[in-house]
C-alpha cells in the first residue's frame, strides 16, 4: 500500500484534529430521541399484535355465534311450528265441533285450513300433521306424499322451510310440472277423495270444476297444447289460490277449506300411473290466506255467521292464531297473530263482492321479483288474478326462453345473487351456454345491479370457455374502462381476454 | 410514551435500558454504554460521509435505533466501535442516496460542525482549512473508496476492522484504500500547487 506524502499526511492530521465532535447536550437529545423511537416501535408492535389477535378472536367468535344461532333458531322454529300446528288443528277441531251443529246445512265458502279429507275424518280423531322441516340451504322442503298417502293420512300436511329459502326456490326451481299432471292431481285430489259429495255440493255452491281447471291453467300459464308448465313467480296469494285447488281443497258446508298443503308451481309431478299420480309437495312461500272462488252474492247469510263464530272460537284459544292457510305462518306465533286481524276484516259484511275471497295483501317476508311493489295490493277476484297471471311474463325463466321481463330498477340484491349464483353454477358445471343465458338474464333484469362487475367478469370467463375471445376481450375492455381497480377485474389478467 | 417503561419494570434506570428487557444475549453490550462510547464516532463518520448538518441528529438517531434493534445479533466478533461505524456508513449512504434522488440543496462541507478548540486562532483556521480541503476531496471521491478512506485515514481503523464493519473482503478494502490514497495524494499535490 502506497504511503502518503508528508504534505498529505499533514493535511489529514490537521483535518482529523479539527473534526466535529458531538457536544453533550446534543448527545443527550439524540439519546432521548432514540429512546422515544424504540418505545414507540415497541408499543406499535404490541398494539399490532394485540389487534391481530383481537381480530382473529372476533372473527372466530362471530362465526361461532352465527352458526350456533342458526342452529338454535332452526331447531326452535321447528319445535314451535310443530307445537303450533298441532295446537291450531286441535283448536280448529274444537271449533268445528261447536260450530257445525249451528251452521249445518249452511253452504258457501269461508277461509279455513281444513282439507276435504280432514272433514271426512271423525272429529274426535286427532289430526296427523305431516311435517317436513327444511334443513339445507339448497333444497326446498319437499314432502313426498302421494295422493294415496294424502287420502290415507287425512291430517293436514305442513311443509315448513325458512321463508327466504322458499322465496328463492320459487325463482330457481326448474319448471318440471306438466300441466295435465297438475290437472290430474287436482282432479284426483278433489274428485278422488272420499268427499265426492261435498265436492258436488261445493260445485253447486259456486266453485264449478271448470273454474278450478281454469285456475290450473292460470298456474301453468301456458296454452293447453304445451306440456310443461313454466316456473313463474306469481304473487303469493295467486300461488296459494292456484295450488289450493290442486291439493284437494273442497268447499263444503260452512267453509271453503284452503289446505295447508300446497303444491308449489314448478314442483315435480311424475304421472307414471295416470290413475295414481305422485306429486312432490312444496310449501308455498305465502303468508296470505287462500282465496276461495265464489261469485259474489251466492253466499248465504248463515254461512258468514258460522264462519265468524268459527274464527272467534279459534282465536279464543290461547296462543293459537286463526290460521287460514299459508304455511309460512306456522313457524312463528307472531305471524299467526299478525294474520288474524286481516282475516277478521275480510269477514266483515262491509266488503261487498269479496265473499270468502280472503286475499290478504300481506307482503312476503322476503321480497321476490314480484314483490317489488311494497304498497298494499288492491283486492282482486280470482278471475282477475287468473287473467293477470296469464298475461304476465314469468319473473324468472330458467329455460332462458324467449320472453324476458322488463328491467327491474330496484330489484333486491337477493334476486341478483340468485341469478348470478345460477350462472356461476352453470359455468362451473361446464354448461357455458346456459351460463351465458343466465348472465343475459342478469343484465336484462338488473341493468344497474350491485353485482354488475362480477357479472361481467363471469361473462368474460364464460366467453373464454366458449372460445369467443374477441367478445370476451370487448367485454373486458369495457369493464376495465369502468372499474379497472376492481379485484375481480384483476383476476381477468390471466384470462384469454387479456392475451 | 409517558408510561414507558411500564410500571413495575425492574430497572427503569434509563430509557434505553429497555434493550435489556427484550432478552438480549448476555454477551451483548449494554446499550447505554455502547451509546456513550460510540456516539461521537458515529457522528464523525456521518459528517465525513457527507450527511448534511441539518440531518446529522436524525441520522445519528437512526444509527442507534438500528443498533438497538440489532443489538441481540452482535456477538462480539468485532469491536463495538467497528460495528457501529459500519451502521453509520450505511445510514449515511442512505441519506446521501435520498438526496441524490431528490436534491433540494447542494452538498456542502460541514461548516457548522467546526467547534472552538481553545487553541490559537491561526491554528484553528489552518485546521479548519485542512478539514474543508479533506471534505472537498471526499465529495469527489467514489462512495466505496470514501467509506474506506474515512474509516482508515480519519478514524484510523485497521483494514480487518473495516472489512468486518462493511462486510467486504479484506483485499477489497486494501484495494479501495490504495486507490483512495492515490487520489488523495494527487489531489494534495494539486491543492499545494494551486496554493502556491
Image (cartoon, rainbow, N blue to C red):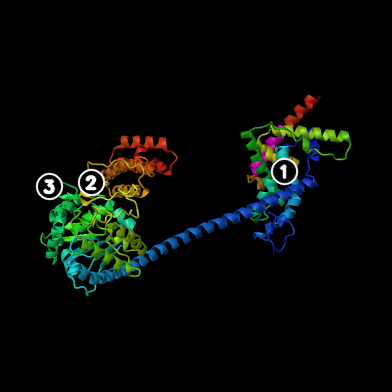
Circles 3 and 1: CB atoms closer than 8 Å: no
Tell me the distance, in whole angstroms, between the alpha carbons under discs 3 and 2.
20 Å
Q: How many neighbours does mark 1 have within 10 angstroms: few (below 14), some (14-19), or many (20 or more)?
A: many
* Subunit under mark 3: A
User: Does residue A34 appear to the left or right of A407 in the view shown?
Assistant: right
SS at badge 1: helix
Q: Residue at x 26, y 41 (%)?
A: A404
**Image quarter of the N terminus of chain A:** top right
Residues at marks 3 and 1 on the same chain: no
Q: Residue shown at 61%/53% (left/top)?
A: A44
Q: Chain of mark 2?
A: A
**A229 left or right, relative to B157:** left
- From mark 1 to mark 2, how far is it between C-alphas? 84 Å
Q: Quadrant of residue B175?
A: top right
Is residue A329 magenta-colored? Answer: no
Disc on the earlier residue, 3 or 2: 3
Q: Is residue B177 magenta?
A: yes
Res A10 → quadrant = top right
Predominant SS along the magenta part? helix
Q: Mark number for residue A388?
A: 2
Residue A191 place in picture, x, y as percent: 12, 61
Nearest to the eye among marks 3 and 1: give it.
Answer: 3
Q: Where does the C terminus of chain A fall, quadrant-wise?
A: top left
Instruction: Determine which of the numbered discs, if any, sits on residue B57 in the image.
Output: 1
Magenta segment, which residues? B170-184
Query: Label 3 vs label 1: CA separation?
Result: 93 Å
Amino acid at each position: 500500500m502506497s504511503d502518503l506524502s508528508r504534505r498529505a499526511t499533514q493535511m489529514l492530521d490537521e483535518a482529523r484534529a479539527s473534526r466535529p465532535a458531538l457536544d453533550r447536550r446534543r448527545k443527550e437529545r439524540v439519546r432521548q430521541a432514540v429512546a422515544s423511537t424504540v418505545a414507540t416501535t415497541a408499543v406499535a408492535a404490541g398494539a399490532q399484535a394485540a389487534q391481530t389477535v383481537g381480530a382473529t378472536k372476533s372473527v372466530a367468535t362471530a362465526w361461532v355465534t352465527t352458526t350456533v344461532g342458526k342452529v338454535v333458531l332452526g331447531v326452535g322454529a321447528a319445535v314451535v311450528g310443530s307445537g303450533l300446528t298441532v295446537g291450531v288443528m286441535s283448536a280448529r277441531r274444537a271449533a268445528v265441533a261447536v260450530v257445525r251443529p249451528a251452521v249445518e246445512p249452511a253452504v258457501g265458502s269461508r277461509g279455513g285450513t281444513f282439507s276435504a279429507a280432514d272433514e271426512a275424518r271423525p272429529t274426535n280423531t286427532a289430526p296427523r300433521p305431516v311435517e317436513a322441516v327444511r334443513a339445507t340451504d339448497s333444497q326446498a322442503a319437499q314432502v313426498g306424499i302421494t295422493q294415496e298417502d294424502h287420502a290415507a293420512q287425512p291430517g293436514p300436511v305442513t311443509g315448513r322451510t325458512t321463508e327466504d329459502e322458499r322465496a328463492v326456490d320459487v325463482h330457481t326451481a326448474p319448471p318440471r310440472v306438466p300441466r295435465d299432471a297438475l290437472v290430474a292431481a287436482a282432479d284426483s285430489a278433489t274428485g278422488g277423495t272420499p268427499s265426492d259429495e261435498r265436492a258436488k255440493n261445493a260445485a253447486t255452491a259456486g266453485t264449478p270444476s271448470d273454474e278450478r281447471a281454469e285456475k290450473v291453467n292460470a298456474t301453468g300459464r301456458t296454452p293447453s297444447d304445451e306440456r310443461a308448465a313454466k316456473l313463474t313467480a306469481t304473487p303469493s296469494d295467486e300461488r296459494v289460490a292456484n295450488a289450493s285447488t290442486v291439493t284437494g281443497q273442497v268447499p263444503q258446508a260452512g267453509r271453503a277449506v284452503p289446505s295447508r298443503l300446497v303444491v308449489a308451481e314448478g314442483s315435480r309431478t311424475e304421472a307414471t300411473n295416470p290413475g295414481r299420480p305422485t306429486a312432490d309437495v312444496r310449501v308455498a312461500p305465502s303468508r296470505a290466506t287462500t282465496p276461495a272462488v265464489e261469485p259474489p252474492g251466492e253466499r248465504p247469510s248463515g254461512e258468514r255467521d258460522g264462519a265468524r263464530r268459527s274464527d272467534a272460537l279459534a282465536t279464543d284459544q290461547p296462543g293459537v292464531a286463526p290460521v287460514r292457510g299459508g304455511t309460512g305462518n306456522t313457524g312463528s306465533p307472531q305471524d299467526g297473530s299478525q294474520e288474524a286481524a286481516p282475516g277478521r276484516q275480510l269477514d266483515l259484511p262491509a266488503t261487498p263482492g269479496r265473499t270468502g275471497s280472503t286475499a290478504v295483501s300481506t307482503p312476503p317476508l322476503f321480497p321476490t321479483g314480484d314483490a317489488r311493489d311494497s304498497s298494499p295490493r288492491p283486492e282482486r277476484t280470482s278471475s282477475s288474478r287468473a287473467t293477470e297471471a296469464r298475461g304476465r311474463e314469468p319473473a324468472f325463466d330458467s329455460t332462458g326462453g324467449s320472453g324476458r321481463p322488463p328491467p327491474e330498477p330496484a330489484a333486491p340484491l337477493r334476486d341478483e345473487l340468485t341469478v348470478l349464483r345460477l350462472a356461476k353454477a352453470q359455468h362451473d358445471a361446464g354448461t357455458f351456454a346456459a351460463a351465458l343465458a343466465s348472465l343475459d338474464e342478469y343484465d336484462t333484469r338488473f341493468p344497474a345491479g350491485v353485482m354488475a362487475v362480477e357479472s361481467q367478469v363471469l361473462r368474460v370467463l364464460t366467453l373464454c370457455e366458449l372460445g369467443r375471445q374477441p367478445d370476451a376481450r370487448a367485454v373486458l375492455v369495457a369493464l376495465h374502462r369502468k372499474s379497472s381497480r376492481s379485484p375481480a377485474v384483476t383476476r381477468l389478467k390471466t384470462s384469454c381476454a387479456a392475451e | 410514551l409517558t408510561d414507558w417503561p411500564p410500571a413495575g419494570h425492574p430497572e427503569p434506570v434509563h430509557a434505553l435500558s429497555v434493550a435489556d428487557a427484550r432478552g438480549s444475549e448476555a454477551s451483548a453490550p449494554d446499550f447505554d454504554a455502547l451509546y456513550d462510547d460510540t456516539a461521537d464516532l458515529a457522528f464523525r463518520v456521518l459528517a465525513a460521509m457527507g450527511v448534511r448538518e441539518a440531518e446529522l441528529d436524525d441520522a445519528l438517531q437512526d444509527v442507534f435505533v438500528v443498533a438497538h434493534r440489532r443489538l441481540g445479533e452482535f456477538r462480539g466478533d468485532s469491536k463495538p466501535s467497528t460495528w457501529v461505524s459500519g451502521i453509520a456508513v450505511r445510514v449515511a449512504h442512505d441519506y446521501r442516496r435520498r438526496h441524490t434522488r431528490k436534491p433540494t440543496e447542494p452538498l456542502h462541507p460541514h461548516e457548522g460542525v467546526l467547534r472552538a478548540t481553545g487553541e490559537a486562532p491561526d491554528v484553528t483556521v489552518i485546521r479548519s482549512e485542512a478539514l474543508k480541503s479533506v471534505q472537498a476531496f471526499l465529495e469527489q471521491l467514489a462512495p466505496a473508496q470514501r467509506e474506506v478512506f474515512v474509516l482508515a485515514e480519519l478514524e484510523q481503523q485497521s483494514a480487518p476492522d473495516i472489512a468486518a464493519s462493511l462486510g467486504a473482503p479484506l483485499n477489497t478494502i486494501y484495494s479501495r484504500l490504495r486507490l483512495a490514497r492515490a487520489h488523495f495524494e494527487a489531489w494534495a499535490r494539486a491543492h499545494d500547487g494551486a496554493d502556491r
